């Protein structure tokens, strides 16, 4: 009997250790998923941009060598930025500047022949929120290049009282893909959301925001990300 009691006590004592080990494993899995998501958000759009710049350089090589060299220089600069940002991700202090990302996207789209209008935020935003917004701008721009024949694009960040609204809209929707509002289009779009948008939606939700995307009957495809902005914002001019 004492042996049975001892065995039961031993098994009971092992249960908390198993629970603790399971919890630790879950933490490790969550961290790996976070790291994979960060790498995807970092590398995907940037590598697409570099590929596009190299393709443009190849097409321009014989006609306008100076323009080709300029595109290759931009691609090289992009590779250096990827190296630096990958180091930041690995060290856990990856943070993006929204203004810098908007300007980078404008330059990329313009180089691809897409006329791009940008309206950065008129007020300072918290760095963590800037990072999520910048990631959203990246993914939306990558989708413009991958999935549309857009000639015009607009990237705007508005700050109505208590919230932040990012809108990325382009005119590259094909006739068959035109529906209603972005919320409706998210369910019926001819361009189904890929891994990038699904991952992006998870990050936006984790940050307390919402994501809607889809085509309008006008032929514009719009991505809208909305976030709460607690507290009062500094006084200053609003974006038109």
Image: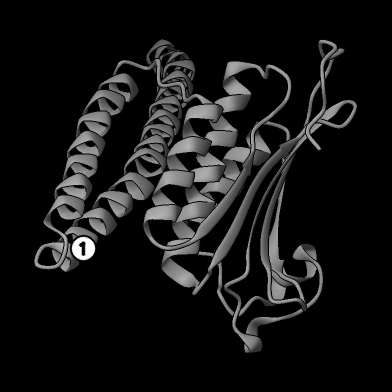
What residue is drawn where x is 34% and y is 38%? Answer: 39
Quarter location, residue 129:
top right
- Say which quadrant the C terminus sits in: top right
Is residue 1 toward the left or the right of residue 153 in the image?
Answer: left
Quarter location, residue 176:
bottom right
What residue is drawn where x is 81% and y is 67%? Answer: 181
**28 lies above or below 109:** above
Q: How is the image coloured?
A: one colour
Q: Looking at this view, is 224 or 37 the one in front?
A: 224
- Say which quadrant the N terminus sits in: top left
What residue is drawn where x is 31% and y is 54%? Answer: 48
**230 lies above or below 207:** above
Q: Looking at this view, is 212 or 233 the one in front?
A: 233
| Residue reaching furthest to the right | 161
What residue is drawn where x is 49% and y is 16%? Answer: 16
Residue 107 x/y as whole percent: 42, 45
Quarter location, residue 31:
top left
The residue at which mark 1 appears reads as 55
- The local crowd at label 1, few if under 14, some if 14 to 19, many if 20 or more residues have their Cα within 10 Å, is some
Q: Looking at this view, is 72 or 42 the one in front?
A: 72
**181 lies above or below 205:** below
Residue 178 x/y as whole percent: 71, 81
Is residue 116 toward the left or the right of residue 28 in the image?
Answer: right
Is residue 230 toward the left or the right of residue 101 in the image?
Answer: right
């Amino acid at each position: 009997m004492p042996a049975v009691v001892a065995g039961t006590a031993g098994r009971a004592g092992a249960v908390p250790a198993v629970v603790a080990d399971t919890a630790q494993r879950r933490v490790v899995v969550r961290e790996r998923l976070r790291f994979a998501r960060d790498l995807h958000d970092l590398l995907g759009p940037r590598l697409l941009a570099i590929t596009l710049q190299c393709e443009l350089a190849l097409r321009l090589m014989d006609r306008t060598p100076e323009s080709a060299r300029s595109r290759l220089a931009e691609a090289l600069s992009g590779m250096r930025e990827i190296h630096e940002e990958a180091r930041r991700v690995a060290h856990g202090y990856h943070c993006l500047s929204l203004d810098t990302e908007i300007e980078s996207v404008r330059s990329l789209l313009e180089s691809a022949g897409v006329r791009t209008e940008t309206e950065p935020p008129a007020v300072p935003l918290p760095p963590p929120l800037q990072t999520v917004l910048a990631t959203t701008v990246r993914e939306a721009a990558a989708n413009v290049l991958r999935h549309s024949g857009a000639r015009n694009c607009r990237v705007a960040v508005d700050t109505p009282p208590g919230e932040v609204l990012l809108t990325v809209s382009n005119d590259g929707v094909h006739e068959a893909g035109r529906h209603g509002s972005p919320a409706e289009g998210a369910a019926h779009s001819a361009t189904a959301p890929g891994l990038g948008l699904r991952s992006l939606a998870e990050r936006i939700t984790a940050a307390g925001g919402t994501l809607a995307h889809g085509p309008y009957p006008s032929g514009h495809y719009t991505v809208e990300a909305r976030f709460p902005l607690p507290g009062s914002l500094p006084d200053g001019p609003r974006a038109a």
